[in-house]
Image (spheres, grey):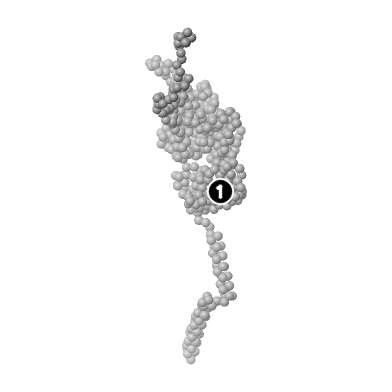
Amino acid sequence: MLSLFNRTDSKLSIFLLIILIILLVLQLSLTKKDVRDYTEAELDKLYEQWAENDLEDDDEQENKPKTVPPIDLNLLRENANSPDDLLKMTKKGQSVMMFVSVANPVDNSKSTKELTEKISAQWQQSFFNNHIDAQNYVVDDDRILFLFKEGQQAWDARDFLIRQPECKEIQLEGRTIPGPASSKMRVEKTKTRRGKNFLEDRAPKLIENDKTAIIMRGNKMSEIVGKVLNELYLLKKPLATKLMRKREIHPFDDDSLLCNFSKKFDSSLFVFGSSSKKRPNTLTFGRFFDYQMLDMVELQIEKFVSSEEFKAGGVAAGTKPCIILQGSLFESDPTLQRFGNLMVDWFRGPVVETVRLQGLELIISLTALDEKKILLRFYKTLLKRSPNSENPKVELIELGPQIDFKLDRSKLASDDLFSTALKKPKQESNKPKDKNTKFDAFGNKMAKVHTGRQRLDEIQTRKVKALKRKRSKSENMEIDD
């Protein structure tokens, strides 16, 4: 009897479950009605649900971190020839802002907002034609903001803008670059002969002036660095300018002040001495091209012996040295090869065609023991009579100073920039461009003039005083008789 009740309960529960499923299916089918049958209240509710879903998607996209491509350090070492190249490669896939100040190209006066908008539109079209994606905003009457989604394109745009006559100044990643419309780049006409001679002396020449050097000291400097700078000044003078004031300069971080000193003193070379806890007793040798940094090498002083301890006398100021680069690394290693070229440029002194044998008094020796260890030595030559030869016997006496360097950091120009710095203009020939002209031995220009054929039979000769024959004295006496 009990088993019968259990069977009836199970059948009843199954039946109720089937009825419940049928009711749910019917309810779902009734709710899926056509959109055209929706009431206004149902449509409003549907729109609200859509708006909530869109806001959630936007929040997810905003909160999602931007994926920045990883930086390949090996690729940076191979392709980064300058700090600009290094910074350009690190900004790949990132947004970069650039501010550009403009001026009126007619008189270099301050630009108006209408002119700035016109210039901005022209530059924007040029960017578009060169496949550079940039957004421009005129933030002031003479100031434009460019936003680059692909950061690497900002440097390509900078190279284009720096050549535009309306560009006054460019600010990119904390660096300010003057443009053609800047007062720093504009050379005003001089009114005096002295000013004209000054500009002509600094103008580019086929045969350059003797290269001068600037010797500077940092804000923190040890006694050893000060003595080395004095020794270098004595060897380089009179082609050297020594600045005694201490300056807070970090050449590898910002070289703008050094470039300004190069333009102020018209110098092509420099050496900067400093000392810190991280880099003690350091010297930075460098050179400029067109008042911009070309090469720069930082050396750490490991050993120093002053010239006063040798007591070998000295040489005359301005003596033409003989420079020797010892070690195969000066030919095989690219960094040491450029460093050797820099040292030759630094110590060579005035350029002369010939040197007499007695004038070779100073020998400068640079020895590369390895890629980091460099020895700098100075010698004085003594010419003594040789009994078995007409040529004199040469002896070397160490003159001092004696310096052992360790190569630390370097900032070398790219091959293209270095080849541009070595390029010489074509020498002007004495041959004139005009036809039928030539120069004589004194430099006077001689020309040959071709005239047309002269017809003497057609020339009117009568009643011309110049063609009348003068009477002789005998004819005049006969007429008187």
- Which residue is found at the position 52% from the left and 78% from the top? 33
- Percent across and percent down for residue 65 are 53, 57
Residue 438's image quarter? Answer: top left
- Which residue is found at the position 51% from the left and 51% from the top? 125
426 and 327: which one is in front? 426
Which residue of the protein is positioned furthest toward the bottom in this rendering? 1
Can residue 217 be seen here? The reply is no
Against 417, residue 241 (above or below) is: above
Which residue of the protein is positioned furthest toward the left in this rendering? 388
The residue carrying pointer 1 sits among few (fewer than 14), some (14 to 19) or many (20 or more) residues within 10 Å by Cα, namely: some
Check disc 1 and give the amino acid type: Ile
The residue beneath circle 1 is: 119
64 and 132: which one is in front? 132
- Which residue is found at the position 44% from the left and 20% from the top? 357
- Percent across and percent down for residue 472 are 45, 11
208 and 8: which one is in front? 208
- Percent across and percent down for residue 68 are 50, 54
